Image (cartoon, helix red, strand yellow):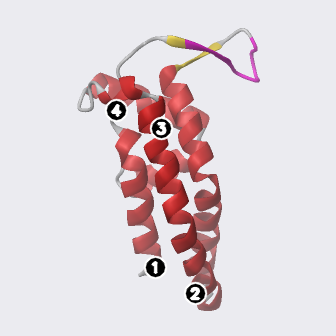
Amino acid sequence: MRILSLAVVIVLSLSMFSCKGTKKAKTDVTTEENPKEEKTVYENVASDMCDCSKEMIDIVEKIQKASAEGDNETLMALAPKVESLTPAMTECMQGLEKKYPEMEEKKEDAENEEKMKAALKKECPKLYELMNAQGGM
C-alpha cells in the first residue's frame, strides 16, 4: 500500500514536466562527455528534475528491494522518509516551472512530449524508468 502511495506521490510530483516543452533552443550548459556539446532545454529540465528527485529515487529503490524481499520492517522504516521528502521534492519541481516558463507554453504537444521523454531517459534513466513503470511517461 505504501509503495503505491509513494508511486502516486512521485508521479504526481513529476508529471508537471512529463508532457511539457516547446523550444528547440540550446543553452550554454555543456555535457561532461563532450564539453563542446550543448544541452537542449529539455535535457536541462530533465537534469534538474533528476536533481529534485535524487533522494526520493534512492528511497524508492530501497522500497522496491525491501518489497521484493518481503522486508516489512524496512518498508515501515522508509515510509516516514518518503513523507518527509515529498514537500521538498514538490517545492523543487514547482521551482522548475518558474525556472523554465517556456515549458508551459505547449503542454499537450506530442512532439514536445517525446523530446521530454527522450531527454529524461538520457539525463535521468532511473527517474524515467520509475515514471514509465507507473504510467507517467
Disc 2 marks which amino acid? Met
Is there CB contact under 8 Å for labels 4 and 2? Answer: no
Disc 4 marks which amino acid? Lys
Q: Position of residue 102 (x, y in %)?
A: 37, 23
Disc 3 marks which amino acid? Leu
Which of the marked residues, 4 or 3, is nearer the chain's N terminus?
4
Q: Quadrant of residue 29?
A: top right
The Cα–Cα distance between marks 4 and 3, rounded to whole angstroms, is 12 Å
- Residue at the spot of label 2: 76
- Residue at the spot of label 3: 96
What segment is highlighted magenta in the picture? 27-35
The Cα–Cα distance between marks 1 and 2, rounded to whole angstroms, is 8 Å
Q: Secondary structure at mark 1?
A: helix
Category of crowding for the residue at label 2, using alpha-carbon neighbours closer than 10 angstroms: few (below 14), some (14–19), many (at least 20): few
Residue 46's disc number: none
Category of crowding for the residue at label 4, using alpha-carbon neighbours closer than 10 angstroms: few (below 14), some (14–19), many (at least 20): many
The Cα–Cα distance between marks 1 and 4, rounded to whole angstroms, is 28 Å
Is there CB contact under 8 Å for labels 3 and 1? Answer: no
Q: Decide if residue 127 is on the left or right side of residue 1.
A: right
Is there CB contact under 8 Å for labels 1 and 2? Answer: yes
Residue 2's disc number: 1
- Residue at the spot of label 4: 20
